[in-house]
Amino acid sequence: MDEATNGAQPDERSGERASEADGSAGTERTDGGTAGGATPQADTDRPTPTPVGDRSEATGAVEFLARSGTRVRILNALVASGPLTRDALQRRFDAARTTVQRNLDALADRGWVRERNREYDATAAGEWVAEDFRHLVRTVDTASELAPVYEHVDTEAVDLNLRHVDVSVTTPDPADPLKMIHEQVQHIEGAEYLRMLFPLTCAQALAALHEQVTEAGADLELLVTPVVAENLRSEADYREMVADLQAAETASLWVYDGQFPYYLGRYADTVELGLVEEGQPAALVATEDERARQWAERTVEEYRAEATPFEQW
């Protein structure tokens, strides 16, 4: 990006929107599970959770399951398809008979599996463990994916709860310094509907927006900060593109007298959230989650309500 503001900081409006954007339910992922390890509905037949200060035995049980992929697969198979014989499980996982038997015995010792007439099935306790273990794995997976986003970024600046949103994350790459910009431009290209918050001046993104509006007739609403507005007016190349956008019937430009805590791109199907640290791009998050689209639309509308048309600024 060409020129940066002096560090995009959260404005006082971010906290007001945070409670609306948290999201309380999980999003269905491509793996058929729930993103972010959303806690499943409480079952009145389930045991009372172990008190926080007395979980050594429960932690040991989780470690016991996590240490063996075979145990996890056997338990999941019995929950999904049981009852099954030992030989059926052996064929399914192409494992040694002794390995299957040893893990069945270990699961039975925990009370998660039972044997009846040489067939094995998961108990109710085993079903609970299998379900919640899957949620734990998804939570860890989501946390690992989002770790680069939150590692260097103030979480209060992001008023959308990304834990419950299926996302892809792009971070700075020394081998490809323009990687995030290229991804941003790819989302802009071909988009017929664009709602944008620009905390930084980016020549490539502006050129892509200009092309989409002037050549494809895209519907654009672009909000910029005062520093970005000054850049757009002071540079000759920018002035020409801005003039074309102002002349287009499908575009409107606005100046918000404050700072945006992030770059935001709202497209027909995709939302882009560009996180900024010390005036530089830190991460680019993309999602097609419907709740994220609604949040992005509402966020742009709220900022626009307090913005000034570019030609009047």
Image (cartoon, rainbow, N blue to C red):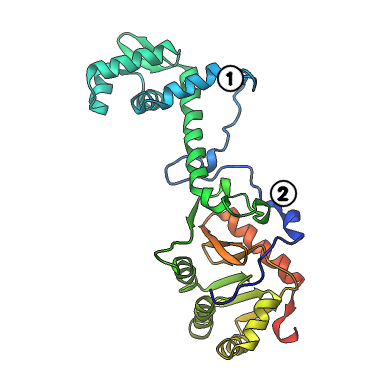
Point 30% across, 10% down: residue = 118
Q: Which of the two residues, 288 or 110, is positioned nearer the viewer here?
A: 110
Q: Is residue 166 above or below residue 120?
A: below
Q: Which of the two residues, 65 or 250, is positioned nearer the viewer here?
A: 65
What's the CA distance linking mark 2 and mark 1?
A: 32 Å
Does the rendering let one see residue 119?
yes
Q: Which of the two residues, 74 or 206, is positioned nearer the viewer here?
A: 206
Residue 9, x across and y down, in percent: 69, 62
Q: Determine whether the residue tagged by mark 2 lies in a helix, strand or loop.
A: helix
Count how many numbered circles sit on residues in the image. 2
Point 71% across, 86% down: residue = 311
Picture disc at residue 55: 1
Of the numbered discs 2 and 1, the one sitting upstream in the chain is 2
Q: Is residue 72 above or below residue 250?
A: above
Picture disc at residue 202: none
Does the rendering let one see residue 272?
no
Residue 110, x across and y down, in percent: 45, 13
Residue 126, x across and y down, in percent: 46, 20
